[in-house]
Image (spheres, grey):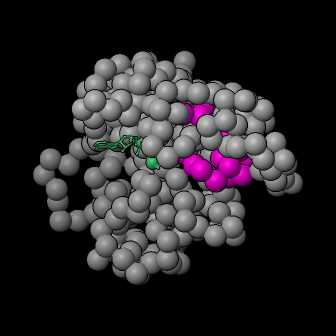
Amino acid sequence: MSLLVCETVTKRFGALAAVEGLSFEVAPGQVLGIGGPNGAGKTTLFDVVSGLQPVTSGRVVLDGIDITKATADRICHLGLARTFQLNAGFDSMSGRENVQVAAYFGRRNRLFPGLRLGREAIRCTEEALELVGMRERAETPVEGAPVLDRKLLMIAGALVTDPKILLMDEPVGGLTASEIDEVESVVARVVREKQLTVVLIEHVMRFLMRLSDRVMIMHHGAKLFEGLPREVSEDPEVIEVYLGKSAKARKDSWFGEKTVAKTQT
Ligand SMILES: Nc1ncnc2c1ncn2[C@@H]1O[C@H](COP(=O)(O)OP(=O)(O)OP(=O)(O)O)[C@@H](O)[C@H]1O
Ligand SMILES: [Mg+2]
């Protein structure tokens, strides 16, 4: 059974259909990469799946449970976590405190928040910081932290909620080549160690191609292409609207030597 199912999902903002009749499924343990031009509707898709925006029509099912109308906190507690395209965090708090907040509120309902974090939240926070390699750099207030650290902290904050599926929106946007490699290693490690199912949006093709089992390219809110990473640069429509004619020549640099170890189902 698929872990995440989207059936003819549509999201309109007035006359604009940001996502239109989009259907796809993600199997447990799979990494689905999403690409597509600016404004294609990628972030909006994450917003409706994660409950930040209500869908206009269609259906979203997580691990057999219909979450179409569920609130964002309920969806998080059911096992779907996400990161954001723009760095999100409580700026005056340290990286560690940010992840602790996610650990405290993201794992279960807190109708009457207490004054103490509890041993479990502290333990999970340290585990998540370790997994993304941020344990030694987590004391700085996030407003002053480098972009790479903020990106890694967002991933830690999502992981600490113990998700079944993790949605990442441009996890390497704005990073240097070596920083991109570092995030790639982190994501590969997380997929391998946690057997996590992942959906990731990215414009950096090398990152997207090397981590993904399958790739979906969106355009005008709809699916333009879905298939194996190696097939993407062969598709005439994808070349036309997104990758450009040089895609075939660049393809070899996307895959490279370093193969990413992952658990396949
Ligand atoms: N809250 C909103 N209100 C009105 N229009 C919106 C809203 N959010 C997104 N849009 C519009 O929906 C379309 C899809 O935007 P979206 O941010 O999902 O694209 P994207 O594929 O993530 O692009 P990018 O690659 O630049 O991040 C755009 O035309 C955008 O202007
Ligand atoms: Mg976006």
The image quadrant of residue 54 is: top left
Look at the picture and state if 117 lies above or below 76: below
Q: Magenta stretch containing residue 130, yes or no?
A: no
The image quadrant of residue 248 is: top right
Q: Residue at image x 41%, y 59%?
A: 86
Look at the picture and state if 53 lies above or below 222: below
**In the rendering, at what x and y percent does residue 166 appear?**
49, 43
Q: Residue at image x 66%, y 29%?
A: 237
Q: Magenta stretch containing residue 215, yes or no?
A: yes
In this orientation, which residue lies closer to the viewer: 24 or 238? Answer: 238
Q: Residue at image x 82%, y 53%?
A: 253
Look at the picture and state if 29 lies above or below 149: above
Look at the picture and state if 159 lies above or below 68: below
Q: Is residue 66 visible?
A: no
Q: Quadrant of the C terminus?
A: top right
**In the rendering, at what x and y percent does residue 62 appear?**
42, 27
**In the rendering, at what x and y percent does residue 114 appear?**
17, 60
How many numbered dots are placed on residues in this image? 0
Q: Is residue 135 visible?
A: yes
Q: Residue at image x 27%, y 35%?
A: 13
From the viewer's perspective, tell me whether residue 213 is left or right of residue 142.
right
In this orientation, which residue lies closer to the viewer: 137 or 217? Answer: 217
Q: Quadrant of the N terminus?
A: top right
**In the rendering, at what x and y percent does residue 171 appear?**
53, 56
Q: Residue furthest left?
A: 112
Residue range in magenta is 201-218
In this orientation, which residue lies closer to the viewer: 41 or 46? Answer: 41
